[in-house]
Amino acid sequence: MVKALIVSSLDDVRALVAAMPGPDTAAAEAARTREANLTKPPGSLGRIEEFAEWLSAWQGHHPPEMRHPRAAVFCANHGVARLGVSAYPMEVTAQMHANYVAGGAGFNAMCKAMDVPYDIHAIEIDTPTADFTEGPAMTEAELVAALAVGLRAVPEGASVFCPGEMGIGNTAAAAALLCALHGGSAEDWTGAGSGVSGADLARKIEVVRQGVALHAAEAADPLDLLRRLGGRELAAMTGAILAARHLRVPVLIDGFLCSAAAAVLAAMRPDALDHCRFSHASAEPGHALLMQKLDAKPILHLDMRLGEATGAVLASGILRTAVAVHTELLTFEEARVTRNHPVS
C-alpha cells in the first residue's frame, strides 16, 4: 500500500515531485528479454513492441497486464470564458457534466467501446477561476484543493490511467500556461479550441497574450504559473499524473489540455513524465509545438481535438493489443521455430 498522498500546501506538492519513484528495472528487463525472443522479426510490430516494456517498468511487474484500465474526466470553469474566448457559454460546462453523468458524451461512448471504467469529477463548477488578465486565476489554497482532487482520483492497482477534462475557456488557459512555460508568442500556442475563428480567435490570442504578460515574469516556478494561468481541471490532471507516478500506474496523456497539465511536471524535473505516453496528436496547433518541446511521439494521429480523455481511452486499445502480443506469442524455443541467422 502507498501512503495517502495528502497535501496542504504547494510545498507538499513540490516534495511529492521531488520524491517520484523510478521504474522497476527488473520488470523492464524481463519484458525486454521476452520481447527479443518472440516469434517475429525484431521490430516488425514497430512501436507496439515498446509498450510491454514500458508497462512492466511502471506497473512494477512482468508480465504487464491491462485488466484494470481507468479513465476520469475533470470538469471546472474559467473566468476568462466571460471574455469570449470560446464558441460556447460558460454554463455548458455544467450541462456537459450532466451529460457525462447521463452517459451521453463522447467520453462515455469511447469508454464503453473500449471497456474502460470511468469516474467523473465536478470541481467547483459554480465558482469559476478568476480572470487571469486581471490577476491570478487561483489562490494557493484553491490550487492545492484542485491538485488534491487529482491526487485522490487514481485507483491503486489500475493498469493504466486516462485523465481528461471539460471546461469552457480551458484552451485559452492551456495556451497561456504553455506560452509562459516555453516562450514564443501567443499566436504559436493558441488555436480554435471549441471552434472560434476570425475576430473571435484574435480576441482569444489577445487574452492569452495579456495573461502571459501579466504573470510570466512574476511566477516563482511552474506550479505558480499553474496557479496564475491554469484552471481547476488542469490542476486536477496535474495532480492525477503525479499520483499515478507514486502509485506505479502508467498514464496515457490525452490531447492539448492534458498535455499542458503534464507539462507543468515536466518543467519541474526532466524525468517527471517517464511513466506517461502521449495518446494522440491533437489538432490544436499548440500541441504539435509542445510535442516538439518535450521530444514526445504521440501514439495516434487522427486529427482529434475533443478532449474528455477520448484520445487516451482510444489508445488504451493499443496497449491491450501490445500486452496480448507480448504474453500470447510463443518464443522461438516454445514454438520450436528456427531463428533467423546472420547472412555471411
Image (cartoon, helix red, strand yellow):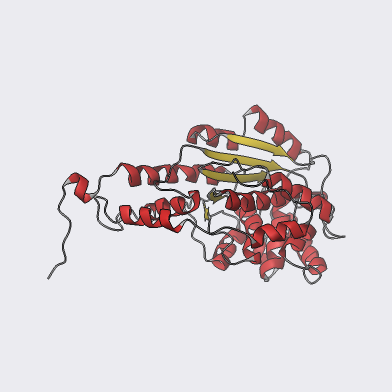
Q: Is residue 198 visible?
A: no
Residue sitting at 58 percent across and 33 percent down?
Answer: 108
The picture places residue 134, in percent across and down from the top left corner, at 87, 60
Q: Is residue 251 visible?
A: yes
Q: In the image, 112: left or right of 337? A: right
Q: Position of residue 337 (x, y in %)?
A: 16, 49
Query: Vertical placement of 212 versus 145: above or below?
Result: below
In the image, farthest residue toward the right:
134
Is 341 located above or below residue 316 in the figure?
Answer: below
Task: Tell me what residue is drawn at x 25 percent, y 52 percent.
Answer: 40
Kindly indicate the quadrant of the structure image that contains residue 19. bottom right
Residue at the extreme top of the image, as rendered: 102
Residue 163 at x, y = what percent? 61, 45
Residue at the image position 63 percent from the left and 36 percent from the top: 119
- Residue situated in front as seen by the camera: 93 or 159: 159
Q: How many marks?
A: 0
In the image, 259 versus 247, the foreground residue is 247
Determine the image quadrant of residue 104: top right
Q: Nearer the viewer, residue 234 or 158?
A: 158
Which quarter shows the N terminus? top right
Q: Position of residue 314 (x, y in %)?
A: 50, 43
* 211 shown above or below 238: below
Q: Quadrant of the C terminus?
A: bottom left
